[in-house]
């Protein structure tokens, strides 16, 4: 089990293992957030935060909600608004301690236009 936390520690995201790869997406929101996404099955992700410690943002087709800490504003993860839509959660790998990840392949996703991985 490894954990990611927001800067202030109010939100903790636990996953069972380090990611096999990370995704650097250039869509309009991910490039602004500066995130690197690690993907897990929703059943494998445990988010711990006090009630009211997080808020979320959804845009466009409103399929995903991006969750952030209300204290330090770090983006911690995204999840599907309708859980039955997918069993996948994106965890912001920038919140893991670098030594807990080690070397991990980073894949570039062209979310701005083609939704295909580059290179």
Image: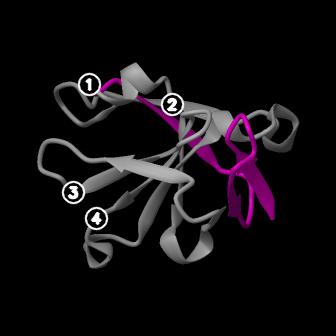
Where residue 14 appears, as percent x and y from the top left, is 71, 62
Give neighbour class at mark 1: few <14, some 14-19, many 20+ (Cα, 10 Å): few
Quadrant (top left, top right, bottom left, bottom right) of the C terminus: top left
Instruction: Looking at the image, tell me whether mark 2 or mark 1 is earlier in sequence order.
Output: 1
Q: Distance of mark 2 from mark 4, alpha carbons?
A: 19 Å
In the depicted structure, whether residue 44 falls above or below residue 8:
below
In what element is the residue under mark 3?
loop
- Is 97 rendered above or below residue 89? above
Which residue is painted at 82% across and 36% down in the image?
102
Q: Name the residue beneath numbered marker 4.
A: 81
Gap between marks 3 and 4 measured at Cα: 6 Å
Q: CA distance from mark 1 to mark 3?
A: 15 Å
Q: Which mark is residue 95?
A: none
Q: Residue at x 79, y 57 (%)?
A: 2
For discs 2 and 4, the disc positioned in front in the rendered view: 4
Q: Which residue is mark 3?
A: 63
Check disc 4: other Cα within 10 Å, few if <14, some if 14-19, many if 20+.
some
Dot 2 and dot 1 residues touching (CB under 8 Å): no
The reply to whether residue 77 is in sight is yes
| Label of residue 35 in the image | 2
Q: Is 64 within the magenta?
A: no
Give the residues in magenta. Answer: 1-28
Q: Earlier in the sequence, mark 4 or mark 1?
A: 1
Please tell me whether residue 7 belongs to the stretch shown in magenta. yes
The residue that disc 1 covers is 28
Indicate how the structure is coloured in the image. one colour
């Amino acid at each position: 089990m490894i954990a990611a936390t927001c800067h202030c520690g109010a939100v903790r995201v636990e996953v069972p293992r380090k990611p096999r790869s990370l995704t650097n997406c250039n869509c309009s929101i991910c490039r602004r957030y500066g995130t690197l996404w690690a993907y897990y099955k929703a059943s494998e992700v445990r988010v711990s935060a006090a009630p009211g410690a997080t808020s979320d943002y959804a845009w466009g087709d409103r399929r995903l909600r991006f969750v952030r800490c209300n204290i330090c504003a770090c983006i911690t993860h995204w999840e599907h608004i309708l859980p039955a839509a997918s069993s996948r959660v994106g965890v912001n790998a920038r919140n893991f301690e670098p030594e807990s990840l080690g070397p991990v392949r980073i894949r570039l996703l062209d979310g701005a236009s083609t939704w295909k991985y580059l290179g």
